[in-house]
Amino acid sequence: MGNKEVIGDGERGFAKGRWCPTKLVVFCNGVTALVASLRPWGKGAGGGTCHPPVLPKRSVPSSASSSGPASTMQPSRWIAAWLLLLQACPPGRSQQAASPRTDIRDCSVDPPYLPPTATNTTARLAALRDAMRAHSVHAYIVPSTDAHMSEYIAERDSRLGWLTGFTGSAGTVVVTLDRAALWTDSRYWTQAERQLDCNWELQRTTWIKSIGQWILEWVPAGGNVSLDPFLFSIDTWNSYSQALQGSGRALVPIETNLVDQVWGDQRPPPASSEIYSLPAEFTGSSWQEKVSGIRQQMEEHTRSPTALLLSGLEEIAWLFNLRGDDIPYNPVFYSYTLLTSTNISLFVDEGRLTAEARQSLRAGCPGPLCVELHNYSQARAHLQRYAQGNVTVWLGTEYTTYGLYGVIPQEKLLEDSYSPVMLAKAVKNSKEQELLRAAHVRDAVAVIQYLLWLEQTVPQGQVDEFLGARHIDALRWAQQHSRGPSFESISASGLNAALAHYSPSNTTRRKLSVDEMYLTDTGGQYLDGTTDITRTVHWGTPTPLQKEAYTRVLMGNIDLSRLVFPPNTAGRNVEAFARRALWDVGLNYGHGTGHGIGNFLSVHEWPVGFQSNNVPLAAGMFTSIEPGYYRDGEFGIRIEDIALVVEAQTKHPTGEEPFLTFEVVSLVPYDRNLIDVSLLSQEQIKYLNAYYETIRARVGPELQRQQLEEEYRWLQRNTEPFPLASTAAAAAATLGTLAIGSLLSVLLAGLQA
């Protein structure tokens, strides 16, 4: 699912306060492309003359004089330095510094011009301001997350959405007594313009520093800035505190959520669906084995924590092999866990547990593998009592709110970014790997059915985006072990595909046409795994730009997928390979390149991926690989596959920890109509042909088993091998491969230096 991991956007990212020099993106008219392709000095992409960075003159040994002036840094050094800077900058950050764009709204006229999709929020804001005055609050901050730092949230927790009408998944709102503003990232600027009325200022950034500056401008000294401490991560709370420090404005937590108070009876009720045990055949190991493994880590830790606090809904569901339906598209349930060496406390709505789930949790009672059930609302009070003893509480700061964190004395805390459960969940064992592979085979069947259906029906002019999204969802539901989509299907034609997070509705649907590109980003939830795949197609004659851009996106997908890299390599250090082919011609994309994925859990599973705050890649991790290109107002391209990190079979094994590579488990061919084979290297064509052989071998039998003969013939046609390049082209491809290898070695050497 593309574009949902813009680094620095959302609570988890912009709290880090990372700085990215804007000039790095535009240095010498496209140095990013020059660095990526290792092209010689000369004309930059924009026509300017590029020069290597110049160092202060110093004496050098005579042996070095032949390689250039003493005042010029050697290429290997400056390339490594620039690559380090490029990797330090979140992909696409330059979009956050983009020049102001024209707002779809026109709030300067009376009455103001608003799109029909905008929400009238005047009454809601008036009611919230009344509540603020009653609590002596001068500014109130509302995030887009819930009490568990969930990326996707239930409608009941969509406070920002209800207050503003904005339905994007990332944003922050600040309301003062006379102003209101929304901060969101570049994925959602156009959507926000369509959904906000003129009560709201749209701030095209997500930096907490920017939010703090706005507060300082519009809240007078002596004013109180308040928020719900159970909706903000520890890092985010600290960032706001630092932004206001010494300003005369106080950051005051209010545990009574003011939006909930104003929302009143209109707020959706709490979830009431069952919480159930995942059948043993769909789990990697028993929950007792998982708990024992975590306890062993606690015992072996140098600080010997006495307890582990879990707040992330995915990690609790995974640990106990339980699933629920509290959040759309995510089979999780609201809960907390406090795990000690002798006790397991699960805070949950006990009445919703099935008899089988209750029996599983209580099978070890009494004893250390007995799960004690407590009411969900008792978690904070229970933790506060526990923290009064001689204890050390281990927690992951990324998923723990300040509301819980604040009840534990600082000297009794053991903090890591991610809990040991989150890290264990990220590395799938052999059974979990096979389960996910099997889910992707059946998922490929549904996607192939969909692509064939589109080929047959779009020329008739009877398909629109909304109908397409519903159809792919129905095809997935028909597959064995299906539990529905893993996120709201993205079905975008033409200019709508340039909106990275566009999802159609009854009011925004467009007809699919043979004259436009179409992007389908969809996924499924199955008992044996979660899927996410994006394909972009064109049923007519694509323009030269569309075809080149698509091919270069595909080249980036292939280059990263076939990469061999050392163990313990961070994803951010190899992410540039997905962009290299685009950079070569001055193109880029403004979202992250990949994210982890769960076993019948979240479609976005942290902490795996290619972002600055992800953990190093390790065998057993699954990640998406999804480069793209978006031309505003015209078209969008994304190619997304799920890949498993595996040990690489290298020519010269070292006998030490093996090198790693990726095994792509998404099994749907790419659109041949959009591939310019002349741009592909010999190695890329070989990889593509081998991938198509794998698709035939794995998906073909499943299509025949399901008696889908027409789809089977479609698969055979669309996985025909591509012809290999000529001898001259092969030689050029070899040089390109050597250049890629040099790029990786220089990058890694620079990181190790």
Image: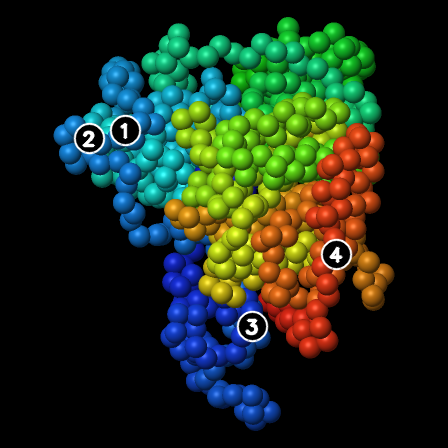
Chain-order first, disc 4 or disc 3: 3
Chain-order first, disc 1 or disc 2: 2
Camera-nearest residue between 686 and 54:
686
| Location of the C terminus (image quadrant) | bottom right
- Residue under the point 43% across and 73% down: 44
Residue 690 visible in image = yes
Nearer mark to the viewer, of 4 and 3: 4
- Image disc number at residue 721: 4
Nearer mark to the viewer, of 2 and 3: 2
Where residue 605 sits: x, y (%)?
62, 36
**Gap in Å between the C-alphas at discs 4 and 1?**
53 Å
Which residue does the numbered mark 1 point to in the structure image? Answer: 197
- Residue under the point 49% across and 87% down: 70
- Residue under the point 38% across and 35% down: 191
Chain-order first, disc 2 or disc 4: 2
Which residue does the numbered mark 2 point to in the structure image? Answer: 112
Camera-nearest residue between 568 and 467:
467
Which residue type carries mark 2? Pro
Which residue does the numbered mark 3 point to in the structure image? Answer: 38
Where residue 190 sits: x, y (%)?
36, 39
Do the numbered discs 1 and 3 sit on residues whose CB atoms are within 8 Å? no
> How many numbered marks, from 0 up?
4
Which residue type carries mark 4? Pro
* 10 Å crowding of disc 2: few (<14), some (14-19), many (20+): few
Nearer mark to the viewer, of 2 and 4: 4
Nearer mark to the viewer, of 4 and 1: 4
* 10 Å crowding of disc 4: few (<14), some (14-19), many (20+): some
**Gap in Å between the C-alphas at discs 1 and 3?**
48 Å
Question: Circle 3 — which element?
Answer: loop
Question: Circle 1 — which element?
Answer: loop
Do the numbered discs 2 and 4 sit on residues whose CB atoms are within 8 Å? no
